[in-house]
Amino acid sequence: MSLPPLLLLVLVTTSALANPAEPLPPQAPFQPKVEDPMLTPAPPAQQLVGSWDEALSLVRQRSTDLGIAEAGVQRAEGRWRQALSVLLPTARVSAGVGLDVLHPDNSLLVLGPGGGQPIPPTVGEDGRRPTVPLVSGAVSVSQSLVDLGAWRGLSAAKAGETGALATLQDVRRRLTLGVARVLVATVAAERAAELNRVGLRQALERAALTQRIFELGASNQLDVVRVNQDVAVARGALVSGDEQLRRAREALGLSLGLDRAAGVSPTFNLQGLVEQIRQVCAPLQGVGERPDLVAARAQLESARDSRRQASAGYLPTLGLSSSVVGLTTEPGPGRLAFWNISAVLSVPLWEGGLRGGVVSERQGLEEQAAESLERTRRDVEIEVARARRSVEVAESLVKVATEARVLAERTDQLTRRSFEVGRGGSLELVQSGAALRQAELTLALREFELVQARLDAFLTEARCDW
């Protein structure tokens, strides 16, 4: 007649305690089979990201931040073109038909919309007289010769365009860093959810083992309560981890420009993420070349030139203009009425204090831009120093977590073995199991933190031109 394994284990343990000189025969550890609905893996997300290229393609297509930055570049180009137009020649062509209602025999020369002058019905030197009604056309050309304010305005617009381009590059860098971080966080959440289920399974196995030993009379009710309490803690960690996973997926979906949660495919190569990002981003020659610093300096330069433009409004301007007017005659087809060329000197005298107010306003904008540049410079220096240091710190933490995980696993194995043979208590069993679960999670998180630290260290000193 064969005895059950656990009863045989209890009898052997009792015999060993009665005869301490006799060695304990080796026994196979008890492996209970557990089933629980919470052990079912979390359902996959609606959309899975299989590669970095796929994630970057979605960002290009759907990112609102990228669209806003690109629109900013377009606006800056438009402002520069407007500033340039002040310095380029302007030409205008107008035509009109004039009729004097009160004096139908008089010809009326229309020079433009809403303007006109009567032309006496006299015969010209060539024997031709204006027609009634009179059809006239005019061509006018003007060119700015001396306008310091316009040149300052063009310089300010050019600096603004440079700043907009740098801002676009910085948005691309930040989007790259943000998507990479969310990808790492999502993979970490997936791994944590998996480890939480492993921890729950181990807790359930300990509970089954304790319950079995209690039924055989080798433990007490306190042992059962303790291990069941550990199961409840493991269940709570699993529920919390699943919620973190859902939030990570939602954050990934938002980063990719989606209105739904997105997950990471099991085939996603997280370890090669840094090398993949190096294909779309290049390291900088120096910290001063970082796009946000370039943009801040360009904004300061633009504000300075804008203030100089306002100050140049006190200076006179010189321009050249020319107009040619033609009209219909009888016999036709027509003749030139006049062609004039004039130089125009404009000297500002008094504008009710408007110019002074503009200068004061733009002086304040310049000071704000200078303070913003200094703040950005300080933030960049701290960010870069922290990113460089974080790689060494993350590597040290991974090493420590690996050692702690090995020790926790060994401790749990020995504690469980001792409990099976009746030499350990349930308190040590619960504590070793909780310590192992925590060590597993800590090691997984440290490994993901190391990947993230390497990404941060690279992207804090990189330019992305995708």
Image (spheres, rainbow, N blue to C red):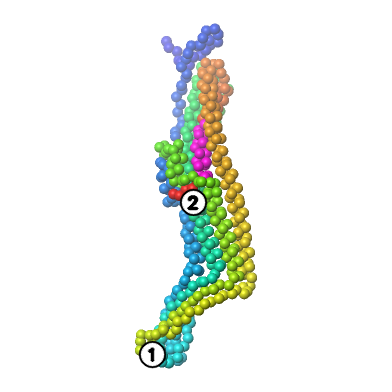
Residue at the disc numbered 2: 169
Q: Is residue 440 visible?
A: yes
Which x, y percent locates residue 162? 51, 56
Which residue is at the front of the view, 455 or 178?
A: 455
Q: Residue at x 47, y 13 (%)?
A: 26
In the depicted structure, whether residue 362 falls above or below residue 285: below
At mark 2, the secondary structure is: helix
Look at label 1 and name its amino acid: Asp
Assign the magenta stretch its main secondary structure.
helix
At mark 1, the secondary structure is: loop
Which x, y percent locates residue 156? 54, 61
Q: Mark on residue 449?
A: none
Which of pointers 1 and 2 indicates the residue nearer the eye? Answer: 1
**Quadrant position of the N terminus in the picture:** top left
Residue 36 located within the stretch drawn in magenta = no
Residue 454 located within the stretch drawn in magenta = yes
Look at label 2 and name its amino acid: Gln
Residue at the disc numbered 1: 126
Disc 1 packing (10 Å; few <14; some 14–19; many ≥20): few
In the depicted structure, whether residue 152 falls above or below residue 318: above
Which x, y percent locates residue 100? 45, 88
Disc 2 packing (10 Å; few <14; some 14–19; many ≥20): many
Magenta part of the chain: 442-461
- Whole-angstrom CA distance, mark 1 to mark 2, is 67 Å
Q: How many marks?
A: 2
Q: Residue at x 59, y 49 (%)?
A: 377
Give the quadrant of residue 232.
Answer: top right
